[in-house]
C-alpha cells in the first residue's frame, strides 16, 4: 500500500498525463505547458531513460533526401508530401530557436545522397520548384559531382547536396528538453509502465500496477511504435533500425550526413568515426519488431556496405552496435488525433521524429 504522502504528491490527479518521454512526449509537454501554464502535466515513461527511437537513432536532423521526397510524392501525392516537408523544416528551425547549436552538437554541414542511376535527376527541377516556398532556396537539391572524390566515395555515380540536412547529438537534445521541462515544472515518473486505462465521464484512470492508479483530465499517447499495444485500430508498424559505429579512422575524408536508396541507408561522421545505419529493406519482415536486438544478417550487410561503398579498400573495426525502434505505416503522415473524449495520440513518426516532434507538440497542444 502507498502512503498518504505519495498519493497526495507523485500519484495525485493531473490535468494532462503524457505517456512516453521521447522527443514527441517532451515537445508535447513543453508546448502544452507554455500554452496552458496553469495546467499540471505529468510524463510517464516505463524505462529509466527515454528509449524507442529517441536515444537509439543515428543523430540525423531528418530533413529528407531527394529520392525520399520523390518516393513520397509518388505514393502520397504532392500535397501531403509538402505538408510533411514543411513540418520537418519548421521543426528544425524550432530546435535551433530553443537550443544553441553547441548545446546539442547541431551541425548543418549539409546532407548528401548517393545516387547510382539517372532517373532521380530527371525530377530534381520539379522537386526544387515545389520546395522553394518551404526552404526559400532556388535549389534545395543540387548535383555535386566534384565532392565524390573529396569524400572518398569513388564508387558512387552521382552525389546530390541538400543544405537543409544536418546532424545532432540525440542524447544531448533529450537532456536539454528534460531541463526545459523542469524549468516549466513538468513532472515525471520514470520506470513506470502503464498497464491499463479506464476512461470515465469525469476523468481517465491510468493503472500502473494492480493496486495503484493515477487520474487525469486527459491523456496523450506519445509511444510511437509501442502504441499498437494500446491502440489496435491504428495503422502502426514497428520498424527496427540497426546501427553500427566504427573505431576512429585515420585520415577520414567523409564529413556530413549521407543517404542512399530512398533513405533506407544513412551514414555520417562522428569526428573521425563513421556511424552507419539502415538496410531494413533487405529483411523487412524480421525488422517489423519492438525487440531491441541486432541481427548477424543485417550487421554483416551493413559492414559490407561500409567496405564497398563508404570506405573501400580500408581495414575497419566496429566499436558499437545497437538498434532503435521506429514506427511506420501505409504512408508517412503522422497520426495526431483525438481518440475519445479524454484520450489523444501523437504517434507514427516514420523515422523522422527529430524534425517532426517539435511541430507535433504544437499540434497536440492546440488539439487538447
Image (tube, helix red, strand yellow):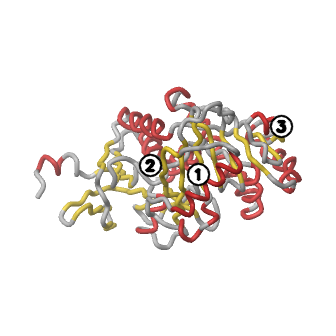
Q: Nearer the viewer, mark 1 or mark 3?
A: 1
Looking at the rendered structure, the secondary structure element under dot 1 is strand
Looking at the rendered structure, the secondary structure element under dot 3 is loop
In the picture of the structure, the residue carrying the numbered disc 2 is: 22
User: Is residue 240 in view?
Assistant: yes
x and y percentages locating residue 332 in the rendered image:
63, 60
In the picture of the structure, the residue carrying the numbered disc 3 is: 138
Crowding at mark 3 (Cα within 10 Å: few <14, some 14-19, many 20+)? some
> Looking at the figure, which quarter contains the N terminus?
bottom left
Is the C-beta separation of discs 3 and 2 under 8 Å?
Answer: no
Give me the disc on residue 277.
1
Give me the disc on residue 328.
none
Q: CA distance from mark 3 to mark 2?
A: 35 Å
Mark 1 or 3 closer to N-term?
A: 3
* Residue 235 appears left or right of 192: right
Looking at the rendered structure, the secondary structure element under dot 2 is loop
Mark 3 or 2 closer to N-term?
A: 2
x and y percentages locating residue 181 in the rendered image:
39, 38
In this view, the residue in front, 105 or 40, is 105
Q: CA distance from mark 1 to mark 3?
A: 31 Å
Crowding at mark 2 (Cα within 10 Å: few <14, some 14-19, many 20+)? many
Amino acid at each position: 500500500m502507498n502512503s498518504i504522502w505519495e498519493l497526495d504528491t507523485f500519484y495525485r490527479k493531473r490535468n494532462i498525463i503524457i505517456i512516453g518521454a521521447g522527443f514527441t512526449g517532451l515537445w508535447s509537454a513543453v508546448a502544452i505547458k507554455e500554452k496552458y501554464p496553469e495546467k499540471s502535466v505529468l510524463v510517464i515513461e516505463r524505462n529509466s531513460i527515454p528509449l524507442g527511437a529517441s536515444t537509439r537513432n543515428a543523430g540525423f536532423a531528418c530533413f529528407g533526401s531527394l529520392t525520399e521526397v520523390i518516393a513520397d510524392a509518388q505514393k502520397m501525392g504532392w500535397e501531403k508530401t509538402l505538408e510533411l516537408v514543411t513540418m520537418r523544416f519548421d521543426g528544425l528551425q524550432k530546435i535551433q530557436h530553443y537550443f544553441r547549436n553547441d548545446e546539442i552538437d547541431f551541425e548543418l554541414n549539409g546532407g548528401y545522397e548517393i545516387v547510382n542511376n539517372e532517373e532521380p535527376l530527371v525530377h530534381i527541377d520539379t522537386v526544387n520548384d515545389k520546395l522553394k516556398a518551404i526552404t526559400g532556396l532556388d535549389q534545395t537539391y543540387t548535383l555535386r559531382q566534384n565532392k565524390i572524390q573529396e569524400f572518398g566515395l569513388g564508387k558512387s555515380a552521382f552525389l546530390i547536396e541538400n543544405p537543409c540536412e544536418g546532424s545532432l547529438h540525440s542524447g544531448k537534445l533529450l537532456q536539454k528538453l528534460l531541463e526545459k521541462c523542469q524549468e516549466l515544472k513538468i513532472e515525471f515518473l520514470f520506470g513506470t509502465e502503464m498497464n491499463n486505462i479506464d476512461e470515465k465521464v469525469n476523468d481517465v484512470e491510468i493503472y500502473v500496477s494492480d493496486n495503484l492508479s493515477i487520474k487525469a483530465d486527459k491523456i496523450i499517447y506519445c509511444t510511437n511504435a509501442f502504441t499498437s499495444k494500446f491502440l489496435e485500430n491504428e495503422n502502426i508498424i514497428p520498424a527496427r533500425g540497426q546501427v553500427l559505429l566504427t573505431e576512429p579512422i585515420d585520415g577520414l575524408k567523409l564529413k556530413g550526413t549521407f543517404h542512399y536508396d530512398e533513405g533506407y541507408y544513412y551514414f555520417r561522421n562522428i569526428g573521425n568515426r563513421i556511424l552507419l545505419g539502415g538496410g531494413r529493406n533487405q529483411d523487412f519482415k524480421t525488422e517489423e519488431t519492438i525487440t531491441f536486438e541486432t541481427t548477424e544478417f543485417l550487421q554483416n550487410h551493413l559492414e559490407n556496405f561500409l567496405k564497398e561503398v563508404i570506405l573501400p579498400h580500408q581495414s575497419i573495426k566496429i566499436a558499437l552496435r545497437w538498434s532503435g525502434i521506429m514506427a511506420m505505416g501505409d504512408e508517412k503522415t503522422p497520426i495526431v488525433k483525438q481518440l475519445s473524449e479524454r484520450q489523444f495520440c501523437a504517434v507514427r513518426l516514420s523515422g523522422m521524429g527529430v524534425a517532426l516532434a517539435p511541430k507535433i507538440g504544437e499540434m497536440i497542444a492546440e488539439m487538447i
